[in-house]
Amino acid sequence: MNQKKDKKEKAAKPKVKKSGKYVGKDLKIKLPSGAEFEGLCIAERKIPKGGEQVFLKLTGPGVVSRYFNVEDIVD
């Protein structure tokens, strides 16, 4: 029974790519709340709901790395 549960959980996870359009580039993110972040993109992923996210290694004091939506990238 545990094997079935494990397979379902595994299928729901988004696939992470270590190469792509944004990987290796310095990006600037502006969230709808007005917060701005800057950092180096180290991975991309597609969300099952339909959308893309980028994982940034953020620069700045006390800021952790996290995923951001592609729509929030500022040119």
Image (cartoon, rainbow, N blue to C red):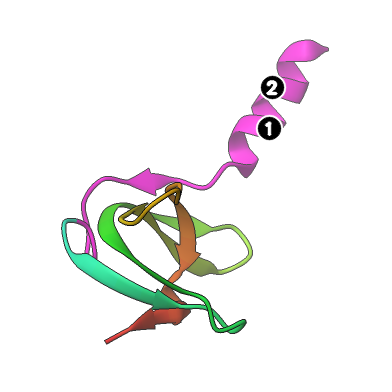
- How far across and down, in percent of the image, does residue 43 sit? 32, 50
Mark 1 and 2 residues: CB-CB less than 8 Å, in contact?
Answer: yes
Return the residue at label 2.
6
Q: Residue at x 52, y 76 (%)?
A: 35
Q: Which residues are magenta?
A: 1-23
> Counting other residues with Cα less than 10 Å from the Cα at mark 2, is it few (<14), some (14-19), or many (20 or more)?
few
Res. 25 image quadrant:
bottom left
Residue 7: give x, y in percent of width and height.
66, 26
In this rendering, the answer to whether 64 lies above or below 26 is: above
Q: Which residue is mark 1?
A: 9
Q: Secondary structure at mark 2?
A: helix
Amino acid identity at mark 1: Glu
Q: Is residue 15 above or below residue 37?
A: above
Quadrant location of residue 6? top right
* Percent of width and height locating residue 3: 72, 14
Q: Residue at 75% of width from left, 21% of height from top?
A: 4
